[in-house]
Amino acid sequence: MAKRIFRCAYCDHRLRFGSSECSVCGQGTPVLNRRGLWVSTFAVLVLGAVMVVLAGL
Ligand SMILES: [Zn+2]
């Protein structure tokens, strides 16, 4: 079962996680609802960890 945390600010429709726009009214969703943000955040964290490890050598 998919968790639907965010609601559309325009029509109050429950947004499917990862979608960049509301499936009902087509307006953009909150940035936190977008999967790309979490993917890039994770990438930055991994990159940062690698840098720390390399700096420690
Ligand atoms: Zn909407």
Image: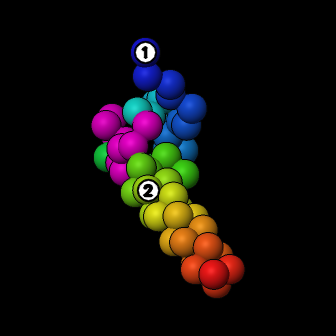
Amino acid carrying mark 1 in the image: Met
Which numbered circle lies on residue 39?
2
Q: Name the residue under label 1.
A: 1
Q: What stretch is highlighted in magenta?
A: 17-25
Q: Name the element at disc 2.
A: helix
Q: Which of 50/25 is in front?
A: 50
| Image vertical order of residue 28 relative to residue 53, above or below | above
CA neighbours of label 1 inside 10 A, class few (<14), some (14 to 19), many (20+): few
Can residue 18 be spotted in the picture? yes
| Image vertical order of residue 22 relative to residue 1, above or below | below
Residue 11: x and y, percent? 47, 36
Residue at image position (36%, 51%) is 20
The secondary structure making up most of the magenta span is loop
Q: Name the element at disc 1.
A: loop
Q: Which of 2/29 is in front?
A: 2
Residue 54: x and y, percent? 58, 80
Residue at the extreme top: 1
Residue at image position (65%, 76%) is 52
The question of residue 18 being in magenta is answered with: yes
The nearer-to-camera label among 1 and 2 is: 2
**Position of 12 compared to 27: left or right?**
right
| Image vertical order of residue 45 relative to residue 33, above or below | below
Lower sequence index among marks 1 and 2: 1
Residue at the extreme right: 56
**Position of 2 compared to 45: left or right?**
left
CA neighbours of label 2 inside 10 A, class few (<14), some (14 to 19), many (20+): few
Q: Which of 35/13 is in front?
A: 35
Residue at image position (36%, 44%) is 19
Q: Which colour scheme is used?
A: rainbow
